[in-house]
Amino acid sequence: MTVPVLVIGGGLSGIAAAIRIARFSLNVQILEQHSRLGGLNSYFYRNKVLYETGLHAITNYAETGDKQAPLNRLLRQLKLKRKELSLCQQYKSKIDFHGHESLFFSNQPELFDAEIQAKFPHIHDKFIQLKKFIDLFDPFTLSPFRSAKQYLSELFGDPLFVDMLMCPLMFYGSSYENDMDLNQFAIMFRAIYMEGMFRPKGTIKDFLDTLISHYEAMGGITRTNCRVKKIIHSGNRVTGVELASGEIIECSYLLSTIGSDETRALMNPPGQITPPADKRLGFIETIYELQEASTSTLPEDTTIIFYNTTKTFQYRSPSDYLDPSSGVICFPGSFSGLPPKKNREIRSTHLADFSRWKKLSADPAAYLEKKRQAAVESRNVLETIVGNFTKDIVFENTFTPVTIERYTSKHKGAIYGNPVKIKDGNIGYHNLFIAGTDQGFLGIVGSMLSGVSIVNQQILPKI
Ligand SMILES: Cc1cc2nc3c(=O)[nH]c(=O)nc-3n(C[C@H](O)[C@H](O)[C@H](O)COP(=O)(O)OP(=O)(O)OC[C@H]3O[C@@H](n4cnc5c(N)ncnc54)[C@H](O)[C@@H]3O)c2cc1C
């Protein structure tokens, strides 16, 4: 039997793409190597407690009536009801440089504007100019890379302000070192500073369960524990896939969400990864759970802190296991309307060097010990920003780029994938397209929009 559309990868881009296809009563199957869906945004259990792997906050918040907003467009395309997700908005977030330069922002863009007017009055008119530019700018063109850093440096002439402005956008969506494509900058600027951040009231498991039951109710099929070992093709026409079990499934169209190079590696002969595509950014993340009667004096009304402690902000692969001099501190319980949880959680994210962690992982005891030390190094910096909390930790879990590689098969465990993006999803085959991280839209809403838009552009018109 030939399946009309196969989707490799059951992360958020694969799930969204498959729902979009199933909406047209087309037979579609998701093939996921793991026992559960979600990819980078999934969950795990320790001592019967559920922990989310990836969720800090979802970008692109929108009010119900704003029909053109990306979030509402996405929900319409997937025929999902907003109320099924129960959106809880962030309180406010902070950009903290050197412990004394700060800018707050929230889902009300006026706050960011007022902060800039008060703290950087000399460039406030330029900031208004930037907002007008972004309003009129179409970031969805297939244009080559343009440096956002250069554009902003010329506009503002203030390196500190440019670094502060770019820091959250880089941490939440740049696969480039020390820069961003201007298109990606504009997408992330709108997503974070103009629209804002939220999370669903339930856990990521509830969110995934809602998506999957919606998909399966439309007739979509999900196959877990199903690793694609090879893509079968004759020249540049794909005829099907071979699974690790040896089973062959024929298809008319194949959508791969596992990454561009990761997809090419499944072809015959396998594609090789060459510079600049092998330059990937790794991250290390630690989850700290604090005891119920915590005595810590952590901020109560801040959702996320994007910080830097060095003279010049460096967003690049570090020359050590991790670089705690900058990073993200997230309080996943600090969203308006979330039901109170027994224990408070803090998450930290820093840039990390994949190659060092990979080498060390050959010695499991040394690798574990280094993870423990990395969490201490991270905490030492975090506590200078949010106050002491070490004494209240009841559970701690650190994952490195090697963990991410192990669970998602992403090359070098790079969350934001290949720095070279393929915006039309076309990697040179008639009926094979890529969506997700390497197509160019990043984050949860971005990856879901990517799945939907590649289906709309490349598959539905032809089927
Ligand atoms: C620690 C962390 C924190 C994050 N925080 C946020 C956040 O707060 N907000 C936000 O918006 N985004 C966040 N992200 C990013 C977000 O999770 C991703 O951008 C998004 O989930 C990517 O989805 P995807 O479908 O493109 O890729 P993936 O999630 O990587 O999905 C690809 C899937 O393909 C499967 N696969 C790979 N190879 C094969 C194969 N050969 N056969 C079958 N299946 C295969 C993988 O197992 C995986 O399930 C975070 C990510 C991480 C890791």
Image: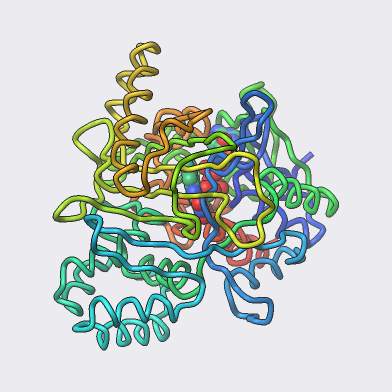
On the image, the x and y values in percent for residue 101 come to: 24, 64
On the image, the x and y values in percent for residue 340 come to: 66, 49
Instruction: Judge left or right: residue 206 versus residue 457.
Output: right
Taking the spot 59% from the left edge, 52% from the top edge, the residue there is 13
Report if residue 231 is visible in the image.
Answer: no
In the image, is residue 354 above or below residue 432?
above
Q: Quadrant of residue 283?
A: top left
Instruction: Judge left or right: residue 375 versus residue 79.
Output: left
Taking the spot 23% from the left edge, 83% from the top edge, the residue there is 121
In the image, is residue 21 above or below residue 190?
above
In the image, is residue 100 above or below residue 226?
below
Question: In terms of depth relative to the viewer, which is nearer, 144 or 47?
Answer: 47
Total numbered circles: 0
Taking the spot 22% from the left edge, 32% from the top edge, the residue there is 320
Instruction: Judge left or right: residue 209 versus residue 155.
Output: right
Report if residue 140 is visible in the image.
Answer: yes
Instruction: Judge left or right: residue 14 versus residue 304.
Output: right
On the image, the x and y values in percent for residue 260 come to: 44, 46
On the image, the x and y values in percent for residue 411 come to: 40, 36
Q: Quadrant of residue 447?
A: bottom right
Quarter of the figure that contains the C terminus: bottom right
In the image, is residue 271 above or below residue 237?
above
Q: How is the image coloured?
A: rainbow
Quarter of the figure that contains the N terminus: top right
Taking the spot 59% from the left edge, 64% from the top edge, the residue there is 89
Q: Quadrant of residue 58?
A: bottom right
Question: In terms of depth relative to the viewer, which is nearer, 147 or 235?
Answer: 147
